[in-house]
Amino acid sequence: MAFAILLALIGVPLVEIAVFIEVGGWIGLWPTLAVIVLTAVVGTWLIRAQGIGVVMRARRTIAEGGAPLRELFDGVCLVVAGALLLTPGFVTDAAGFLLLVPPFRSLAGIWAWQRWGRKVRVQQGGPGVIEGEYRDDTPGGPG
């Protein structure tokens, strides 16, 4: 795992520099910089719009008594997409925009669940249960 992180920290900037040089050679310096800024602005707008949708879906799922696991995964994907889109580069922008596509996120979710889902254990009841009392203090509530 440490080797993969080291490889990413060295490899991603090298690939981005190579792509910058190639794209800059094709379209020039200023258009290249303009495209990088434009992808950051458009990506930020898309993340905001999709983030609001994810929060609304999570609230609806919770109100229906379900666990918003898919919405949580989508939220994590949007955070990662935001980091990738704000990082200058064409390769990171491409990866960030992929995470904004819901069918791709679904495939990523299936892959993540197959890879790590078997290791997740959910325990209900038994040790670790905290008992308490509940009081509704909302106006007009049972008090």
Image (cartoon, helix red, strand yellow):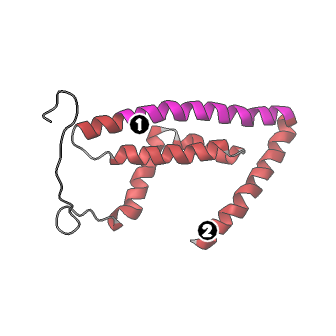
Q: Which residue is mark 1?
A: 54
Q: Amino acid at mark 1?
A: Val
At 49% across and 47% down in the image, what residue appears?
77
- Between 11 and 44, which is closer to the camera in this rendering? 44
Disc 1 vs disc 2: which is toward the camera?
1
Identify which residue is drawn at 79% across, 51% down: 17
Q: Which residues are magenta?
A: 30-56
Residue drawn 19% across the image and 38% down it: 136
Q: x and y percent of residue 40 in the render?
A: 66, 36
Q: Position of residue 54 (x, y in %)?
A: 41, 36
**What crowding class fits label 1: few (fewer than 14 Cα within 10 Å), some (14-19), or many (20 or more)?**
many
Specify whether 49 is left or right of 127: right
Mark 1 lies on a secondary structure that is helix
Real-space Cα distance between discs 1 and 2?
31 Å
Question: In which quadrant will I find the N terminus?
Answer: bottom right
- Kind of residue at disc 2: Ala
Q: Earlier in the sequence, mark 1 or mark 2?
A: 2
Main secondary structure found in the magenta portion: helix
- As drawn, 101 above or below 15: above
**Horizontal side, residue 136 vs residue 21: left or right:** left
